[in-house]
Image (cartoon, rainbow, N blue to C red):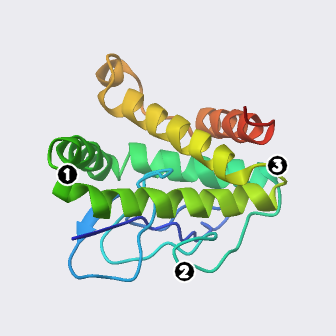
Amino acid sequence: MTLTLDLTFTPSPGSGPSPSPGSGPSPSPGPGPGPGPGPGPGPGPGPERGSYAGGGGARATAPPDREAAAVVLAGLLHRWLTVGRERQLARFELSLEAARHPELEPELHRAGRGARARAAGILAALGADRPQEAAELLAAWTDGLLYDRLAGALARSRPAPDPAELTATARRMIDAALAGTP
């Protein structure tokens, strides 16, 4: 089993960058060359391979600035919280199952390392002093936000995610990741 995350982005006409269809983690058949994030930020869909930035053999293409990165991350978060909801819930379930069954860990962890490598490439291009540490923080914050919104105590009572709110949150997460790491 190979876990992948699609970080390929296709701008929607008139709406700025948005993630391509199928974002979110899932098992895909075959040995495939490399994973995408299990956020890493989480994480991927079917057989597609991430190509947004660095790591896992993907071509590096970082957003030109922090705002563009925030818009892209917000687009991913929105997708993962709406049409990719079931896929993200499955990824969380797989993570828990891998914690109980170590034989599942290699592929799941490989996917997480791929996500962090791509995030580190983006953060390095944005000027992070320690991009790998910043990527680990960003991945953890992303997973935390996803878990809270999908399965947390208030998940069922919250309204659908607002793209503007997610962009503001993504901006704060990226700014904090770039502010320095301990």
The reply to whether discs 2 and 1 touch (Cβ–Cβ < 8 Å) is no
Q: Could you tell me the amino acid type at mark 1? A: Pro
**Amino acid type of disc 2?**
Gly
The reply to whether residue 111 is in sight is yes
Q: CA distance from mark 2 to mark 3?
A: 23 Å
- Name the disc covering residue 129, or none: 3
Residue located beneath label 2 in the image: 57
Q: Which circle, 1 or 3, is nearer the viewer?
A: 1
Nearer to us: label 2 or label 1 = 1
Establish if 60 lies above or below 160: below
For label 2, the SS is loop
Report x, y in % for residue 104.
Answer: 20, 57
Q: Identify the disc placed on residue 102.
A: 1
Above or below, comparing residue 105 to residue 157 in the picture = below
x and y percentages locating residue 33 in the rendered image: 39, 83
For the residues labelled 2 and 1, the Cα–Cα distance comes to: 26 Å
Relative side of 58 to 33, left or right: right
